[in-house]
Amino acid sequence: MSLNSKPLIIDGIVGNGRMLAALGSSGELHRLWWPQIACPQHVNEFVFGIFVENWSDDVAWLNGDSWTHRQYYLEDTNCLVTSSTCENLPVAVEVTDFCLPDSDTLVRIVDVTSSHEAMVDVKLFAAASFAICESARYNAVQFDKEHDAMVFYRHRHAFAIGSERECSWYEAGKRRDALTTRPAPRARGPAPLADGHETPSSHSVHLNGTAVAMGMHGALSWNFVLSSEESLSVPIFVSAGDSPETAIATHKASKSRGAARLLDATILYWHRFVQSGRRLHTTDESVRRLFKRSALAIKLMCDKTGAVVAAPEFDEDYTRCGGYSFCWGRDAAYIATALDQAGFHDLVTHFYDWTLKAQSPDGSWAQRHFMDARLAPQWGLQVDETGSIVWGMWQHHEALVAAQRPDKAREFATKVWPAVKRAADFLTISVDPDTKLPLASRDLWEERLGEHVYSAGAVCAGLKCACDLAQQLNRVAEAEPWGAAADDMLDAICKVGWSEERGHFLRVLKLQISEQTFRDHELNGVRVFSQTEDKGYVRRYANIDSTVDASLLGLSVPFNVVRANDQKMQLTATEIRKRLTVPGVGGLKRYEDDHYIGGNPWIVTTLWMGLYDLRLGDVEASKRALQWAIDHQTDLGLLPEQVDRVTGRTAWVVPLTWSHAMYILTVVALDEQKQI
């Protein structure tokens, strides 16, 4: 009952805000999340297979090596099409996947087309394995004869799978790897002879009709005969519910509407979504296409609760990272700002409504949260997240004003004010009296504990934006301590956060280090110190960390606490470009000696530099960064987190929501200046 290993990099996603599906290039369903888009996940495996009498020796599963695939989204939609052909079979298969906007149903329309001049006898198999709530335990499956559907269930989660077309065979408990050839269970009449075959095949494959089983597995088949170039459609519905009965009810309702009508309605839904967004001036079709795909991808990452997922989860066992299917306030503030600039203001309001539920009692926002706003696994406070959310709230207020929605802007400001006040009070007292920088927390890359200059920029911007909001609401007196703290912090950034010797901003002050590193630093003359804390624990620190880090661009973009043309900022940007540009492939890695997944260039950091260049007026450099991102999108138009530093191929996390947000921010900035 072990679970299948899943790919770390997926190809396509479809969803509706409550249900999210991740698929491979063959159309295999790797993961299905419901009733929230990040947790829990329920699919162990879901694969289609074809058996053609007199042609097949065994079931040809579509994720097998004998198939060739082409995959694409229907234009301006989140409807994914996977077209497959097999070198050994006289049929082609096309699967169209989409989630209904108004129902907890994934629709998988399977079209099978004959390419043979004679009639062919085809069996389509759907083999599914549900590890509900990501567990191999306590799952069960049963075939509902009344509704012609296989139901997988475990406690409060159930999934019904069936079609408009009645299935031919079924078997609860059937594993895909056990579905193999055997003598045919019944005669089906004379079969046509296939080219190269002297006699009909003596083997067939079937399901035995078992209706109930304990376990994860089950299979259905549809048997039909196709004449030359004839096509047949098998629309399959995967409907969710909190019990077998509710899953069946959802399944029945979806099926009654008809897959063809549902596809048309879903296409219309996505077209209207795209059309409701910003109209670009640019006529560059590659820019426009990825802009729309970015908006569509981000929409899939927006949970119905209002939370925004960093990426669809792909490493559930934390084999190479700490997981991505959570909402980070920092990422989400950038994403929300991008959505505002793309014209999707209601999504942003919904996100900031969610942040009011996620705020900690002390006024901070923790590292990351589940979709229901509860605390997720974390590595401790990242103070830049609190600053970023407050900064983002003000950006949203200004976006509503710019969109000529002053009443909405006022309503929003009034609603978030209590949270902003708590956050600003927290940020004001969470300052090191020696450095005037925020007290030690994790950096935005979640790798170091110290007083980070980027985090100081985010906090400084958050405090300034809290002051702006206070002025808007005539609460200026309450904001005086925040303004003073922001001024002191900016002064500290430019003084203690600056290294005259190195000619750029420092990454960290008071960096916590290991005992071995402490000893090595002492031997090499690096300034270090130690402190004895509660219960006698000794913590060791390096006074500074001067590693060049792309995040230092944040002081100027987006937080604007240090002007882009400030000499210190320009010198820092020069060092970032010189030391972090990856030879050959191009793009910027995060920082010197980055080892995460090999130290690759990121979409986020490359576009970050492009935005900074535009602030300086270097349009051509900004356009080059934008083109680099366009050149490194996936075949489906999704932006990864990283690009392999040697091959230039997608290296990690598809799609990364923050990557798509930075693309939108860069396009809008260039488009407003009519530079693309």
Image (tube, rainbow, N blue to C red):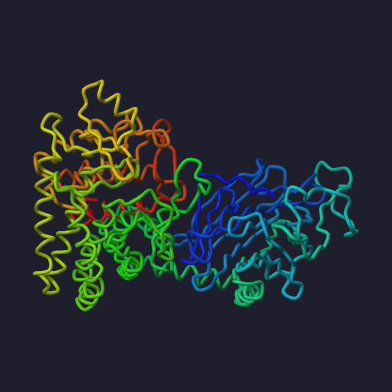
Q: In this view, does 308 lie to the left or right of 171?
A: left
Q: In this view, does 636 lie above or below 538?
A: below
Q: Which of 333 and 660 is in front in this view?
A: 333
Q: Looking at the image, is 272 positioned above or below residue 591?
A: below
Work out whether residue 118 can be spotted: yes
| Count of residue discs | 0
Q: Nearer the viewer, residue 173 or 87?
A: 173
Image location (x, y in percent) of residue 419:
26, 68
Residue 221 spot, x, y in % from top left: 75, 60
Nearer to me, 104 or 386: 386
Q: Which of 586 and 501 is in front in this view?
A: 501
- Pinpoint residue 585: horizontal percent, then vertical percent: 36, 33
Q: Would residue 224 be seen by someone viewing this image from the given angle?
A: no
Q: In which quarter of the image is residue 467?
A: bottom left
Please identify the quarter of the rendering in which residue 208 is found: bottom right
Q: Residue at x 61, y 77 (%)?
A: 253
Q: Which residue sits furthest top?
A: 523
Q: In this view, does 479 lie to the left or right of 37?
A: left
Q: Residue at x 32, y 68 (%)?
A: 356
Give residue 539's quadrant in the image: top left
Q: Position of residue 20 (x, y in %)?
A: 51, 61
